Image: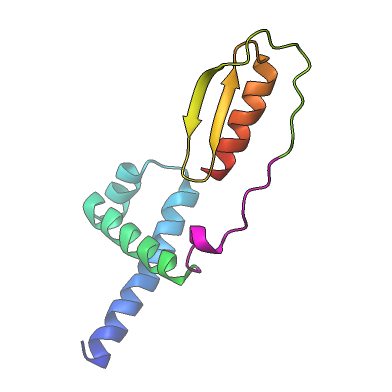
């Protein structure tokens, strides 16, 4: 793409950024706004997509799992006696195995599952 074409594309995108902001600030449905301003609704959404993609490309690259900190677990104490020591539920994950024994309180199970949810 030559410089003139690049300049045209960039100029058109800047115009559409302003038009999209105007549409969003108008409070009107997109279809109504486009009709009132003589634009095709498909054109509006085409430029909206292009502008979003352009803005997304400017964001920093997301952190990969290798770069994240290891999960920190907190020791939970079971306050109710456990009548049976066999596990009722066993969940095997790549990094750990979780055994929930019969009689474990609902509060403890919820806390453990929330901790797992935050790392998985």
Q: Position of residue 49 (x, y in %)?
A: 32, 58
Query: On the rendered structure, is 54 left or right of 65?
Result: left
Q: Looking at this view, is 42 or 22 the one in front?
A: 42
Nearer the observer, 68 or 23: 68
Instruction: Determine the residue positioned at 74% across, 29% down.
Output: 76
Q: Quadrant of residue 106?
A: top right
Query: Which secondary structure type mostly characterizes the magenta part of the structure?
Result: loop
Asked if 10 appears above or below 69 in the picture, the reply is below
What's drawn in magenta, residue-wise?
Answer: 60-73
Q: Residue furthest bottom?
A: 3
Tell whether position 68 is magenta. Answer: yes
Residue 91 screen position, x and y as percent: 49, 29
Q: Residue at x 55, y 64 (%)?
A: 67
On the image, the x and y values in percent for residue 80 come to: 76, 12
Q: Is residue 63 visible?
A: no
| Left or right: 1 as drawn, with respect to 63 | left
- Residue depicted at 73% across the width and 38% down the height: 74
Q: Quadrant of residue 113?
A: top right
Q: Is residue 78 above or below residue 113?
A: above
Question: What residue is drawn where x is 74% and y is 35%?
Answer: 75
């Amino acid at each position: 793409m030559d410089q003139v074409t690049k300049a045209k594309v960039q100029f058109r995108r800047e115009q559409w950024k302003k038009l999209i902001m105007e549409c969003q600030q108008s409070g009107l449905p997109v279809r109504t706004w486009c009709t009132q301003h003589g634009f095709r609704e498909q054109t509006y959404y085409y430029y909206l997509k292009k502008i979003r993609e352009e803005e997304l490309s400017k964001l920093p690259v997301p952190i990969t799992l290798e770069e994240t900190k290891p999960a920190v677990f907190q020791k939970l104490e079971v306050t109710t006696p456990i009548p049976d020591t066999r596990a009722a539920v066993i969940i095997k994950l790549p990094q750990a195995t979780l055994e929930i024994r019969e009689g474990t309180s609902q509060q403890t199970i919820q806390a453990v599952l929330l901790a797992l949810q935050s790392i998985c």
